[in-house]
Image (tube, rainbow, N blue to C red):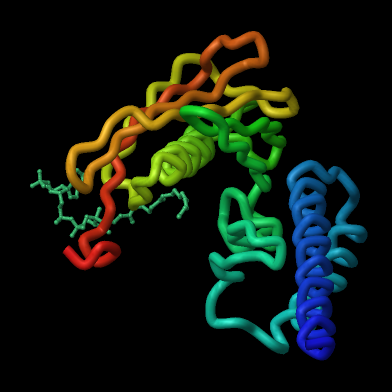
Amino acid sequence: MSRMSVELGTEESRLAALCALAQQTRELMDAVALTDVGEDDLTAAHAALTAVNERLRSVLRQTPQPFEIAPDGTLRHLGNAVTGGANPHALPLLIEVRDGGVRAEVVFRPLHEGPPGAVHGGISAMILDHLLGQAVAAAGSAGMTGTLTVRYRRPVPYGTPLVATAEYTRTEGRKTWAEGRISLPDGESLVEATGLFITPSAWIGA
Ligand SMILES: CCCCCCCCCCCC(=O)SCCNC(=O)CCNC(=O)[C@H](O)C(C)(C)COP(=O)(O)OP(=O)(O)OC[C@H]1O[C@@H](n2cnc3c(N)ncnc32)[C@H](O)[C@@H]1OP(=O)(O)O
């Protein structure tokens, strides 16, 4: 029993170190996107990163960190591209489930630039895809995205606190619909999405 606790604690401690590394990597990616240092510094940074890259690649997993139950009993997916603390690609988004829907605060970064001075539309769509998926899962109808329709009403700024929300709307058999949006804090909607999520037949043995 005590040995199991020690092993669990050791793994959680390693995962915390991995998440800290992912966060440092996000900050590195931000720095790469914005740096204006000279060529010598760029060359030195490249050499240092090559060494780090080789060290990390000396032992590789087959897949990212899995969807799992954390020691505190909550579900977590540290490898997820939107919410995963161990995935440098993730913001990461912290999603709150509340009556009738889900909500997350989002601050995009210059790294997410698409059109000059604004967030790439594919990034907004990815965030909404995930949020809508989480809304249908919270409603008890988890599924894979079948279709996602996005309406871009205003350019999405980076460096500004925004709010992303989504709600379940209806279910027909294995099909569930949800809608959501990314808004300014005053409620003005910037991007809106509706999505159809399908519970794969394989998940329910249909
Ligand atoms: C707890 C976890 C929390 C975790 C919550 C985490 C949230 C994560 C959110 C991110 C979600 C993603 O990005 S998911 C990744 C992007 N999506 C995918 O990769 C999906 C790839 N596609 C597939 O795997 C499959 O095609 C499925 C699962 C969508 C459907 O396959 P299937 O289960 O075999 O369904 P099938 O029998 O063919 O069709 C069932 C019905 O749905 C219709 N249908 C099938 N596909 C589509 C479609 N794309 N668009 C419209 N309608 C469709 C059919 O016409 C049929 O209608 P009728 O004849 O019955 O009327």
Residue 92 image position (x, y, % from top left)? 67, 47
User: Does residue 150 appear to the left or right of 41 in the view shown?
Assistant: left
Q: Could you tell me residue 161's position as x and y percent?
A: 72, 24
In the picture, measured across the screen, residue 98 lies left or right of residue 105, that is left
* x 57%, y 37%: residue: 97
Give the residue furthest to the front: 1
Establish if 158 lies above or below 123: above
Point out the image quarter for the C terminus. bottom left
Picture coordinates of residue 181 (x, y %)?
48, 24
Q: Residue at 21% of width from left, 61% of height from top? A: 201
- The number of numbered badges drawn on the structure is 0
Residue 24 in sight here: yes
Residue at point 60%, 63% (across, down): 79
Query: From this viewpoint, is residue 50 visible?
Result: no
Quarter of the image for the N terminus: give it. Answer: bottom right
149 to the left or right of 91? left
Give the residue drawn at x 29%, y 64%. Answer: 203
